[in-house]
Amino acid sequence: MSHGPSASGGSVAQPIPGHHHDEPYVPVFAPGSAPRAKLDDILTRYPTKQAGLLPALWIVQDERGWVSEHAMKEVGDVLGLTAAYVKGVVTFYTMYHQHPVGKYFIQVCTTSCCNCMGAEDVVKAFLEKTGCGELGLTSADGKYTVIEVECLGACGFATPIMVNDDFIDSVSVEKVPEILKKYA
Amino acid sequence: MSDQKLVNLTIEGRPVSVPEGTTILEAAKTAGVLIPHYCYHPGLKIAGVCRMCLVEVEKWPKLAPSCATTVADGQVVNVYSQKALDARKGVLELLLINHPLDCPICDQAGECELQDYTFQEGRADSRYREPKRFNPAEDFGGDVLYVTNRCILCTRCVRYMGDVAGDRALCVEERGDRAHIGIAPDHDLSHPWAANVIDLCPVGALVSKDFLNKARAWELDRTASVCPNCSQGCNVTLEMRDTTLVRMKPRSNSEVNHFYLCDEGRLNYEWVNRADRLETPMVAGKPASWENALAAAGAALKGATAHVVASASLSNEALWLLKQTAGTGKFRVAKGAEAPLPGVPDLALRADRAPNATGAELLGFSRADQPLAGAGAVVVIAGDDCAGLDTGALASAKAVIVLGSVVPAGAPAGAILLPIANFAEEEGTFTNLRGRVQRYLQARPAPGLARASWMALAGLAAAAGKGGVYDSAEAVFGAMAKAEAAFSGLSYDSLGLKGQMAAGARVNA
Amino acid sequence: MGYPHKQHPRETPILSKYFGDPEARTLAGWKARGGYKALPQALATDPVAIQNVVKESGLRGRGGAGFPCGLKWSFMKIGDGKPHYLCCNADESEPGTFKDREIMRWTPHALIEGCAIASHAIGAETCYIYIRGEFTQPIAVMEAALEEARAAGIIGPNACGSGKTINIWVHRGAGAYICGEETALMNSIEGRRGNPRIKPPFPAVAGVFGMPTTVNNVETLTAVPHILNNGAEWYKAMSLNNPKSTGSKLFSVCGNVARPGNYEVPMGFPFKEFLYDLCGGPLPGRKFKAIIPGGSSVPVITIEEAEQVKMDYEGFMEFGTMLGSGGVIIFDDAQSMPKQLARLARFYAHESCAQCTQCREGTAWMTKILERIVAGQGTFEDLDTIFELTENMTGKTICVLSDSCGAPVTSGITRFRGEFEALITGKRSSTVAVG
């Protein structure tokens, strides 16, 4: 389902070329697999299986880079939940990617505390230097996706960004090229 | 429940006494005050999210959501204080900022709680100057169409599917103003009880594909009835546009179906409207007056042994008169898969796909796969469609009398045909599988010369010299209650519109 | 990476003493710095006695609400036969706040010790530390420290040899501000959408997994071992203004300021000295204009007001704002208040969980109006609408996210109305380019 104009301007990443939804789905949590063992271990910490949902989705994203509808169904099957339930949860939390993203997923904090320190220019610099052009789009080479993100909780270190799981603080426009050199 | 502690409070100046644990919203109903609400529904878990039911409780710093606030002794609740009215006006304004003004093409118009409460308490204008949110409509499967733009996110549908239907097929997707009701691929609303989400939806977001653009709510005439599609006996409302049945909706009855109706029951109604009806009595292939037809049938029955094929779709009244006229007999019942609604005890689409097998049994009729066994007698067929009956037995019968609402396919040419009404065209009672006797009322006239089944059978009984004189279904029921132990003590008055247990069933239970 | 500035001599470094010291992250390093002294003693002490010490100390919740910590613990009925849970709120998502992040990434064992003591004090065998998903480094540091603590038998099935079970697990969030609300946090742990729950029932009666639960902020829990080590009187003595506000408090400072970072001062410290002395005043050539002192959800005050504030729960309230989480956001004279407040409103619209009508629709509407004003398309009626909308959005919803959207906006319009009117009349553009 597409979404109309919204105040918060949530950006949705587009599928990258060459990624086909109709390829046969390979389960993440096959019996005996390492992800399955990891999830089983996590489940011992909670009194319900459902509580394993956020951790399970993290494992999926670590393994696959995003959480597809097939994966939602699989996670649901493993935890005794419906795919719709899982989808409701996945779409609530902004960090689960519902579409494939670039090899380097760059999130730039632009909430007020960073905004007043020039975060918008940092965003512009990333969009320009990565070739993404627009928020949420993946660069033609499949390498980068840039989005604005709400407060990353490092406000005194404006502007903090995340490149995949790496947290980098005090990013200025000048530092953008050297950061991209590291993630080439 | 009698030992439950009562709580005394004041709602809108009226003293109210309700059991401990009652919510303010429910307590207000007992004082005749309907506090506006959307997410609250008595059949669902409390969500407390629409914030429409805010009321002022004296000495409380904040307004209280009346659906989620339980009563306390001495509470003074003001539903229509300026503060409460302002808060609800605010909620209505916010619900409408992104709601399309498409009432003229919305099936919910006229029975829409957003319309009603806006008319009652809302602003006359909107201060919203921004573009409205737009999302396309989505087919949710089953009978359900989701018109996203009209959704107010009350989540009744999500809670119903998860907690009552036991099938979490729906979710709230996304968050903030992007939120909408979501569904997963390959798992649509094909649950046998899913279409209840249409009734639960307080606005026009979940609409029936079957009813889509068929009628406006205010053109419909509504009649209390009982679903004839299985032996559960769900209470329903027949909604007629002129004389056409266009929709069957559940009517709440906490003893039977709570607020619900299964999809099969709900959607199997078109046959009521069929045009190829038996409209005139027939004798030996020729139209006859009722007088002549009844006289012929009465003559055939006098002194003869009758073989009776009854139907579990006939009313208790008709079955009892049939028994008076020709004795008891056999009936057959169509079977189907049972489909329970897990969240409600003892509620299911039942295997017996007919409304009155229990009534027939209480009156002495018995089930048979082939109800016409043995031959040579006078055969009386009442309510059975004759399809698949033993044609040899029919052919060798001394006489065949058929009471039916359509021309029976397998009846021999010489049969006496008496046209009767279907359940929407007459008054009567059915006894559900637990022995609950429930009334259904007449929603439309019977076609042509067709008569209510009780009236046709009363006439037949009289013609055969077996019956008294009855001027109404109620009178027949009264006589039956006197004669039949199973129905003793019951009357139309005592049944009301929600029914009562048959004495026989009470003993058996 | 790193701690951005040296400790200021006027700070009272208790929780922040070892910020910037990587060796404090290890178990050995932490023990050498006096760690894990309070826990073994606490485990041998009656839970209610611990509750009483904390009550006596005056420690109040550092997450924003300021609820007395010992009192909250006393709501947990010890020995009721039900499993109890402690949830450590490390979701730190309030714009302007980044103190818990520093506690976790520099002194993880301090938090573990606080969690273990609190678990014992409320009769819980399981504690979940709910860390926001974006905090990858704090998560890694905490996980490593927990592993060390488990291996050393400090926590686990026989914590410190006490025979008591105290399991502590990290639960990673996945991007949702609202999960910092305690009931939303519990839903998130249970594998649900992070929707706040209606209260009652309160967490101490039916919390996570329907069981009695206490939710405490990272900073609150980290203060507990210090209170047990030094006594309630010592903690209570750290109070420069109102005796109801005790102890030291970490203030996160960000925005247009010379030295942003975390500063730890006793409750009641003068805000003026804090801003100009500790934080170094404004950036060169600029002047402070407006301050949101307690994380973005509290009302904005002018610098003139701020200069009179004593930094404690009551001191901020005197000026119509709140201590909140202690996240001090500073805007200088180069900033457009309409633009910054529009951006803040957008944050709340993005983070609304979508349950309550006022919040779901109101935060988005508020944002659209403000963005239209910033774009020069506003009217005076829009300002009135914002105030009425805020009234509709305040005190009427399950949680306070919707209130939090209105508070900074309306206080900002009240105090900086001229900037809004200038945009509306088009007489001058806002002080900076608006894009």
Image: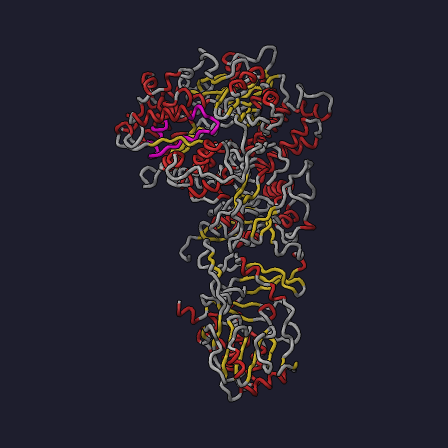
Q: Is residue A179 visible?
A: yes
Quadrant of residue C130 in the image?
top left
The magenta stretch spans residue C39? no
- Image position, residue B288 (x, y; %): 65, 82
Among all residues in the image, which is located at the extreme bottom? B303
- Image position, residue C314 (x, y; %): 49, 24
Magenta residues (range): C114-139
Is residue B218 positioned above or below A17 on the image? below
Comparing A74 with B287, the one in front is A74
Comparing B380 with C124, the one in front is B380
In the rendered image, which quarter contains the C terminus of chain C? top right
The magenta stretch spans residue C131? yes
Q: Quick check: B43 left or right of C114? A: right
- Image position, residue B86 (x, y; %): 62, 41
- Image position, residue C106 (x, y; %): 41, 19
Comparing A127 with C145, the one in front is A127
Residue drawn at x 44%, y 14% is: C11
Is residue B231 positioned above or below C243 on the image? below
Q: Is residue C321 visible?
A: no
Residue drawn at x 32%, y 22% is: C36
Comparing C352 with B295, the one in front is B295
Tell me how the rendering is colored: secondary structure
